[in-house]
Image (cartoon, coloured by chain):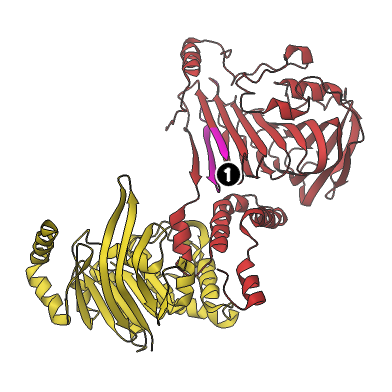
Chain colours: A yellow, B red
Amino acid sequence: MSTLEIRDLHVSVNTEDGAKEILKGVDLTIKSGEIHAIMGPNGSGKSTLAYSIAGHPKYTITSGEVLLDGENIVALTADQRARAGLFLAMQYPVEVPGVSVSNFLRSAKTAIDGEAPKLRTWAKDVKEAMDRVRMDPDFASRSVNDGFSGGEKKRHEIVQLELLNPKFAVLDETDSGLDVDALRIVSEGVNRYTSQGDRGVLLITHYTRILRYIKPDFVHVFVAGKVADQGGPELAERLEAEGYDSYVQAAKLQAAQN
Amino acid sequence: MTVTDAAQSPNRTRDNVSGAIETSDKVASHLHPKGSFRVDDHPVPTGLEEIWRFTPLKRLRGLHTDAPFGTGSVEFSASLAQGVKLEEVPADDQRVGSSGYEPTDRISARAWEAATTATVITIPGDTVVGGATILTHTGVSVDAASAGHAVIIAEPFSVSTVVLRFEGSAVVADNIEYVLGDGAQLTVVSIQDWADDAVHHSTQHALVGKDAQLRHVAVSFGGDLVRLNVSLAYDTVGGEADLLGLYFADAGQHLEHRLFVDHNRPKSISNVDYKGALQGEKAHTVWIGDVLIRKAAEGIQTYESNRNLVLTDGCRADAVPNLEIETGEIVGAGHAATTGRFDDEQLFYLQSRGIDESEARRLVVHGFFADIIHKIGVPAVERGLMDAVEKELAINIGTPDSYAAAVDQTGEEPA
């Protein structure tokens, strides 16, 4: 049983006009076995939340805590957080020319486990993980994400999710840019991961369509750098019908009052 | 036909305009170098000349002025592949100069004059030579400069590989000629793996025969200053040349590669692909890619590329591609040169998968060099180069298994 707690998290980025605060006090608690959906309009800071949890150096945590099983991880580097059990599936996975997928996966697995995977079973594990998301085995010898289509990049993220099997996965708009088939395949991958029963997911999305395949236990509405509302799956249905507009207006009003 | 033009200095534009109305092959530009064997025809450079402006003359140890050449500073050893012949011949042997090269700078002319003998390597015709011929030059002293001359003759329809190794401490100026007979396939790998105090000025020129294929690979890792001129011309039609290069400059090093492809005949092909990494204060690399497409060179194809990866602050990478085109009747001509910093997003992506920073950097740099190393086609050399890249990376960012080692020693993760 693990927990990922985010407490009063404030995050800023450096811009030409100085530091700009993006996250303005985020509170969230995710326990293993739970799926939390974070929904919000563009520019609300959803991706910043994802990157801040994962430890991207561009984002400065000015106050607050991210606790993994009670340990504050904000001082850890991205690789240390990953080894501690966090995983970020990126909205735009990065291309790394000249580094093959198989070499990359083996390096990552070795780093996470602290020892090289067993040669005999590893090749089979990789092949099966790729098969499950309908990725051609040829991709193993290609450069990481290099020349992959948008859908192929997202499937590759899911292959990594399954092989590295973290305690908590943050999925940053994994549904964006996917056609119906790819969305189903990717969602099935996430569901296989959560079906282990003791894994936690923070599913960041703009649209409700991925929630037809992945059933969240909790839904948080994210507006203007903080959680504006939360509830159960029924909240997603309301958002589907009504959109974010009322939340955005309320946030604007509040900002004006401050 | 596609043409991508070089960024032109005002000077060069004028040359091109005059070139456009010229009716002979004689156009005034540095891409039409007029060679001469007489040292006096090449004035002592001041550093302002186009061909010298990137080179720190002060560090040439007088090679560009009149430093005397001596003997005994470089030890030579050869490991010949089966059937390959080595001779030491006097400088007046008719094979010396048979590539058609005439010195185009003072150091090359001085080396030509100073070398009283030449090493002639002959690869027998109609033979596929197994294994590589390895010529090793080991410098033992920087007190006296050395001049060298070699002629490597690939007889018609031979297939072979020659590796030139330069190591140790020395001050060397040399001229190396490659003469490829009809249909010959010659792979040359020139590895400048000198000690930190070495100075090397090397001029390597090839004459590519009918349907012959030259693959020249320049690898520069060591030395205080390395200036390598690689040039080629075609004897007749159908020749093909791949000029590949890989360099890694550390703090204080000056590594300069100057390419000149003279498309003087129709239906010839050239591809230039150089990649370099730089790390440390005052690491400096220079890449000049000159391609001349003469009026006669119809139906040719050329592409040149240089990519530099800057790993730390304080480095400088100069890259100048020049393309001078005197006929439009070609299949294609283009070039690209880029210099980029280490990509932090690549680093973050790898780190977010648990891979520590030094290992992530290692993977990215490996990836950067991998495609060019795999083009070499000589497995032993490819493995050696991967190891050499590894060694270079260890200087700056820790050994590849530093993470594992640190865990082993302390039982904890390194901070």
Residue where numbered disc 1 is placed:
B275
Quarter containing the N terminus of chain B: top left
| Magenta residue span | B296-319
| Residue A186 in view, yes or no | no
Residue visible at 55% across and 56% down in the picture: B367
Write down the chain letter for disc 1: B
Q: Position of residue A23 (x, y in %)?
A: 27, 63
B178 on left or right of B309: right
Q: Position of residue A16 (x, y in %)?
A: 32, 44
Relative to A217, is B272 above or below?
above
Q: Position of residue B259 (x, y in %)?
A: 62, 32
Nearest the camera: A135 or A215?
A215
Nearest the camera: A86 or B81?
A86
Amino acid at pointer 1: Lys
Residue visible at 86% across and 23% down in the picture: B68
Quarter containing the C terminus of chain B: bottom right
A23 on left or right of A107: left
Nearest the camera: A170 or A66?
A66
- Residue B173: name its quadrant: top right
- Give the secondary structure at mark 1: strand
Residue visible at 34% across and 66% down in the picture: A63
Query: Residue B301: within the magenta?
Result: yes
Query: Residue A213: within the magenta?
Result: no
Q: Position of residue B401 (x, y in %)?
A: 63, 67
